Amino acid sequence: MADKEIMATGRRKTSIAVVKLVKGKGRIFVNGKTLRNYIGNRPAIEMLVYRPLVLTENQERFDVRVKAVGGGVVAQCGAIRHGISRALVKLSEENRNVLRLEGLLTRDPRVKERKKYGRKRARKRFQFSKR
């Protein structure tokens, strides 16, 4: 890799994250903020985002720059993880097997079900009264 950036897109629920891998020291920037500032004090979510870099042993080699839109913070972090995984596969095909075994290359297809008419939410009914 000769000083070029690798781009990939990750998605989860209604969130989309455009990820750029750049040579660096292992920092992640989301919408201009560091990852820690963006998600607040949530170490579990931070570990979730770093997982693909840790598995492929690229944690100290790349900086990650992300533009994330849509959904909530946790869904955006899932999209970032998916995008980082896809970028690492573009970088080297050898990463594919490691990431595939952990399920990081599969897009999580679960989205909120739409509300149906005659119901309170998607499946919840209004209270039934016998008398």
Image: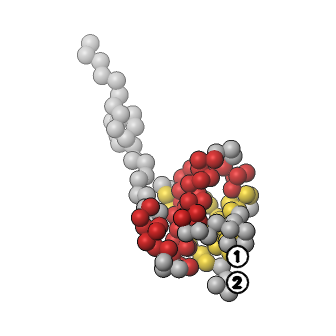
Mark 2 = which residue? Answer: 3
Look at the numbered disc 1 and give the secondary structure of its residue. Answer: strand
Q: Is residue 77 above or below residue 131?
A: below
Q: Is residue 21 above or below residue 50?
A: below
Q: Are marks 1 and 2 in contact (CB under 8 Å)?
A: yes
**What residue is shown at x 44% (from left), y 61% (from top)?**
102
Left or right of 129, for residue 27: right
Viewport quadrant of the C terminus: top left
- Residue 55: give x, y in percent of width and height: 54, 64
Mark toward the start of the polypeptide (1 vs 2): 2
* View extreme (top): residue: 131
Query: What residue is rendered at 34% in x and 23% in y?
Result: 127
Q: Which mark is residue 23?
A: 1
The secondary element bearing badge 2 is classed as: loop
Q: CA distance from mark 1 to mark 2?
A: 7 Å
Horizontal placement of 74 versus 100: left or right? right
Q: Residue at x 39, y 43 (%)?
A: 115
Residue drawn at point x = 59 percent, y = 75 percent = 7
Q: Nearer the viewer, residue 33 or 2?
A: 2
Name the image quarter holding the N terminus. Answer: bottom right
Counting every numbered tag in the picture gives 2
Foreground residue, 5 or 54?
54
Looking at the image, the residue that sits furthest to the left is: 130
Residue 56 visible in image? yes
